[in-house]
Image: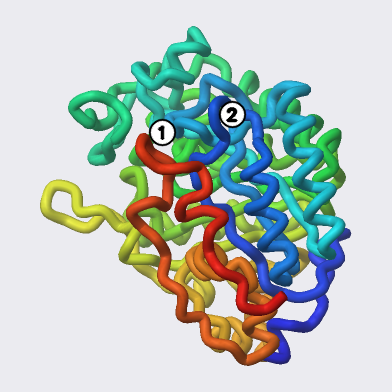
């Protein structure tokens, strides 16, 4: 794995290797949304295990924008203090870390505790409910509900900016805008969830506006070379997906505009059957090869590929110049020393504890989280 293990610079972020730990929601910031000592140990283990870059789990920019219990946030000084311990620990182990900034939009539920505490409705580009989904912590496991149309999208753009400021105070090396998986920025981009007739909807340019303005807001805080974005053109998850021709037109335009900003990197997620729900008897995703479809339009920005990669496949793609770095998710969950194993030629054979991937009543915070074994010190 010589190519995967070589240094790379993403924008202004210098990495010791090209192995990126992908964002992984784990629901362990108990009892609140402030990162705790167990979260600290989780990230420290994986930095010690050789990760070049760690992307945090989706980190909420405001209390209003979540459906995930015990997911971390970054909108108060308390959040900053919690994250500062983590960024210091990651840096001490030689890794870099960026905060993935997250707002779930219509993927929330009005009965979720954090949503209730915010005193605000579930907001989305348009009053269109996502199909499918479930809220496992609510009685009866209800599905999505019709959201309230967001009156002024600039309010959320400003919240992304404020979160970027907090992330800087917390000692991160940069920020990644979560523009994938059917969350708020993706909802604006997709014509099936955005039926607005103002400057934020309709044409491709208007639907892309929210994503671009949010990215520019982050750039105003960090500079472009410490801002990244994650995209999932295939859709599927959280009821996303347009016809193929429209998908190609929309994401080609968006990626060209993002590339002109000269961000640190653009992360593209490939099609993954595990994130392609069956709705009304049909799979939801718009399957296509994201690498061949969009790589030609990424000229000024580094490219990170995500979803279902093996280390050997990633090494080949890096060696051929098709990608600059590779992001891994499940492999980092069950192998806190993943990169060290790759360098030593050790097998990646530990199994993910899927029953305890998220915290739930009846288990300790550590179970299925920080109790995986590192075989290389």
Image position of 12 with respect to 290: above or below: above
The x, y position of residue 216, in whole percent, is 75, 39
Q: Which mark is on residue 105? A: none
Image position of 286 with respect to 87: above or below: below
Query: Which of the 4 quarters of the picture holds residue 157?
Result: top right
Please state, as top left, top right, bottom left or bottom right, where the N terminus lies in the image. Answer: bottom right
Query: Which of the 4 quarters of the picture holds residue 243?
Result: bottom left
Q: Nearer the viewer, residue 303 or 292?
A: 303
Task: Write the residue at 57% across / 25% down.
Answer: 32
Question: From this viewpoint, which residue is outermost toward the top?
Answer: 119
Please state, as top left, top right, bottom left or bottom right, where the C terminus lies in the image. Answer: bottom right
Q: Nearer the viewer, residue 300 or 335?
A: 335
Task: Write the residue at 50% across / 23% down.
Answer: 198
Local SS, label 1: loop
The residue under label 2 is: 33
**Nearest to N terminus: mark 1 or mark 2:** 2
> What crowding class fits label 1: few (fewer than 14 Cα within 10 Å), some (14-19), or many (20 or more)?
many
């Amino acid at each position: 794995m010589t190519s995967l293990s070589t240094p790379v610079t993403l924008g202004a972020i210098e990495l010791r290797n090209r192995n990126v730990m992908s964002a992984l929601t784990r629901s362990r910031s108990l009892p609140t949304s402030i990162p705790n000592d167990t979260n600290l140990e989780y990230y420290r283990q994986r930095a010690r295990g050789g990760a070049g870059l760690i992307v945090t789990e989706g980190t909420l920019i405001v209390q209003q924008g979540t459906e995930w219990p015990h997911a971390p946030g970054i909108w108060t000084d308390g959040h900053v203090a919690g994250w500062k311990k983590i960024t210091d620990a990651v840096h001490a182990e030689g890794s870099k870390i960026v905060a993935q900034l997250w707002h779930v939009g219509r993927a929330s539920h009005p009965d979720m505790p954090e949503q209730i505490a915010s005193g605000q409705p579930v907001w989305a580009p348009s009053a269109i409910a996502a199909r499918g989904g479930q809220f496992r912590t609510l009685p009866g496991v209800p599905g999505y509900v019709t959201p309230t149309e967001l009156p002024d999208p600039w309010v959320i753009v400003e919240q992304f900016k404020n979160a970027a400021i907090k992330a800087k105070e917390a000692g991160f090396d940069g920020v990644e805008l979560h523009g994938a998986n059917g969350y708020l920025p993706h909802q604006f981009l997709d014509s099936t969830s955005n039926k607005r007739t103002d400057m934020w909807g309709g044409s491709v340019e208007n639907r892309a506006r929210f994503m671009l303005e949010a990215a520019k807001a982050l750039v105003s805080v960090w500079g472009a070379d410490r801002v990244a974005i994650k995209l999932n053109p295939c859709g599927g998850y959280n009821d996303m997906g347009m016809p193929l021709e429209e998908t190609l037109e929309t994401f080609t335009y968006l990626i060209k505009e993002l590339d002109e900003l000269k961000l640190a990197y653009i992360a593209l997620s490939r099609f993954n059957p595990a994130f392609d729900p069956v709705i009304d008897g049909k799979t939801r995703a718009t399957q296509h090869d994201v690498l061949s479809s969009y790589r030609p339009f990424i000229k000024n920005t580094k490219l990170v590929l995500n979803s279902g990669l093996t280390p050997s496949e990633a090494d080949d793609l890096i060696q051929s110049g098709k990608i600059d770095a590779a992001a891994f998710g499940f492999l980092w969950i069950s192998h806190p020393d993943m990169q060290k194993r790759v360098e030593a030629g050790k097998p990646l054979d530990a199994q993910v504890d899927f029953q305890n991937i998220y915290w739930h009543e009846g288990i300790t915070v550590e179970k299925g989280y920080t109790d995986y074994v590192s075989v290389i010190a």
